[in-house]
Image: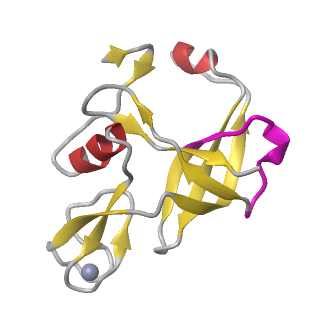
Amino acid sequence: MESAGATLPEVDGVNKNFFEGLAAGRLLIQRCSTCGSHLFYPKPWCVVCGSLELEWVEAPKEGKLYTYTIINRVIGNSKEFEKELPYAVGSVELDVGVRVYARLLASNPSSIKIGCRVVLEPRRLTDKVGLPYFRVVE
Ligand SMILES: [Zn+2]
């Protein structure tokens, strides 16, 4: 399934709120109503206590880059990603204690450093699907 030149993620009952939130400019993550743990990626139950009582909350729009990599080539049938080379992908640590995998945006790739601050700048693919992108604060 493609739209606007991008491959769409497989949306299901567990991750629907996550992708729809990003389409609306918000990063929604789950919080366990029983133990209070924040969770990422979307799951059907809490991985800390096993509770099924999960709620969706808006995550902070800023975080710290935990780690990253620069993608310089793609393999297989990833032609649409090839057009964007090189690009950065990272793990962003939010203040609520979870890490979110996301694409990174920076006007100068050398400004991407572990520990740097990043700000959410989601990319809307459709009315119902957005992806997490974070811009490096320079
Ligand atoms: Zn829990």
Q: Quadrant location of residue 87?
A: top right
Q: Residue lying furthest right in this view?
A: 110
**Residue ID at (32%, 40%):** 24
Report the side of 67 relative to 120 (left or right): right
Q: How is the image coloured?
A: secondary structure
| Magenta-span inclusion, residue 41 | no
Quadrant for the N terminus, please. Answer: top left
Q: Is residue 93 above or below residue 22?
A: below
Q: Is residue 129 above or below residue 77?
A: below
Q: Is residue 138 above or below residue 123?
A: below
Q: Is residue 51 above or below residue 133?
A: below
**Residue ID at (71%, 39%):** 106
Give the image location of residue 62, x and y in percent. 55, 60
Report the side of 129 relative to 55 (left or right): right
| Magenta-span inclusion, residue 112 | yes
Read off the magenta span: 103-115
**Residue ID at (53%, 15%):** 80
Give the image location of residue 130, x and y in percent. 37, 36
Q: Nearer the viewer, residue 133 or 82?
A: 133
Q: Nearer the viewer, residue 11 or 31?
A: 31
**Residue ID at (22%, 78%):** 50
Report the side of 73 relative to 96 (left or right): right
For ligand 1, the image quadrant comes to: bottom left
